[in-house]
């Protein structure tokens, strides 16, 4: 029970990768703050902060669902204060919430550009900013950001520059925080999948059921996150990890169990 009584604040944890990470940590007794927007279920997406909270508690953890839109700083501040008061502190932040639109310049509306900037970049920054006073007092404190290695191959910029620059900004923040907080006992790392992950975004926006069948389940990210968050904050920091590499460090090399369709050809994710 490595994570018993430790508190993790996860943005976008009502479904998909965020919820998978929440359940993995909850199984070892963690307290999970579910910070997400969904309080009424959208059939296309599934899940709310309340349904995720029930699953966290059924898995063995304690849950605090908080309706949160990280575009709004006052909501972030209130959520951090509520979480810290409820559980007695915050030991980890997982920046999972993100907006995606894979369009070229002429097809990217300004409101979508602004949305990705306000969630992926500004929102992620403000979540860490307002968690910082609590992380300073946390146990083996970690910041984990779901963003990719910074790959400057032009193909990752040319097709969807508006999205790419926000995800690279998240990774730059992850690396910057590692340097900024290295004397404070707070680790900061980024994590990204080698292959596509079966999420609502993949099903609804990117490739439908066909791409979902060529993907892995969110459990692979959850297991990789579990390993990272279990490492000493003083030494495991400043990395842009890829899930397969993390699991190899953990001694897990047979990844077939993570495939949505066993034996299927897997589709490589962006940036890797």
Image (cartoon, grey):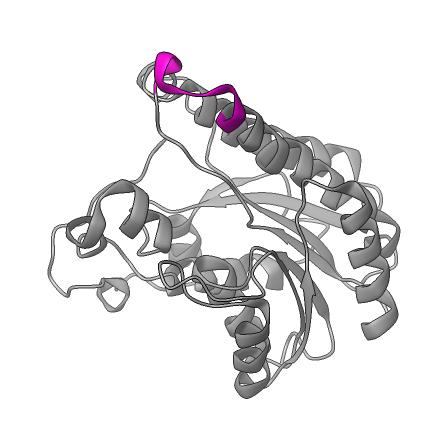
Q: Find the magenta span and give its range.
A: 104-112
Predominant SS along the magenta part: helix
Q: Nearer the viewer, residue 14 or 263?
A: 14
Counting from the top left corner in percent of width and height, residue 251 is at: 39, 63
Q: Which sits in the foreground, 124 or 230? A: 124
Residue at 30% x, 61% y: name it.
Answer: 253
In the image, is 40 to the left or to the right of 256? right
Residue 18 at x, y percent in the picture: 51, 59
Compared across the picture, whether 120 is left or right of 271 comes to right
Residue 110 included in the magenta stretch of the image: yes
In front here: 25 or 32? 32
Membership of 55 in magenta stretch: no
Q: Nearer the viewer, residue 132 or 140?
A: 132
- Looking at the rendering, which quadrant does residue 5 occupy? bottom right
Which image quadrant: the C terminus? top left
Q: Residue at x 35, y 18 (%)?
A: 107
Q: Is residue 166 above or below residue 43?
A: above
């Amino acid at each position: 029970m490595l994570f018993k009584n430790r508190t993790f604040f996860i943005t976008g944890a009502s479904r998909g990768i965020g919820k998978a990470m929440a359940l993995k940590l909850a199984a070892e007794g963690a307290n999970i703050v579910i910070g997400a927007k969904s309080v009424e279920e959208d059939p296309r997406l599934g899940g709310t902060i309340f349904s995720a909270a029930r699953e966290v508690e059924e898995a063995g953890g304690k849950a605090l669902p908080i309706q949160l839109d990280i575009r709004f700083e006052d909501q972030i501040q209130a959520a951090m204060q509520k979480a810290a008061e409820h559980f007695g502190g915050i030991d980890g932040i997982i920046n999972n919430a993100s907006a995606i639109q894979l369009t070229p310049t002429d097809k990217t509306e300004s409101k979508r550009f602004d949305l990705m900037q306000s969630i992926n970049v500004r929102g992620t920054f403000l979540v860490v900013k307002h968690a910082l006073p609590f992380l300073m007092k946390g146990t083996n404190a970690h910041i984990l950001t779901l963003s990719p290695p910074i790959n400057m191959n032009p193909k990752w910029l040319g097709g969807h520059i508006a999205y790419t620059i926000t995800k690279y900004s998240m990774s730059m923040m992850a690396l910057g925080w590692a340097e900024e907080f290295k004397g404070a006992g707070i680790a900061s790392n980024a994590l990204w999948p080698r292959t596509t992950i079966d999420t609502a975004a993949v099903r609804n926006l990117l490739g439908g059921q066909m791409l979902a069948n060529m993907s892995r389940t969110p459990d692979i990210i959850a297991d990789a996150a579990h390993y990272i968050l279990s490492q000493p904050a003083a030494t495991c920091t400043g990395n842009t990890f890829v899930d397969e590499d993390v699991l190899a460090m953990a001694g897990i090399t047979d990844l077939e169990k993570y495939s949505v369709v066993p034996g299927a050809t897997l589709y490589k994710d962006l940036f890797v």
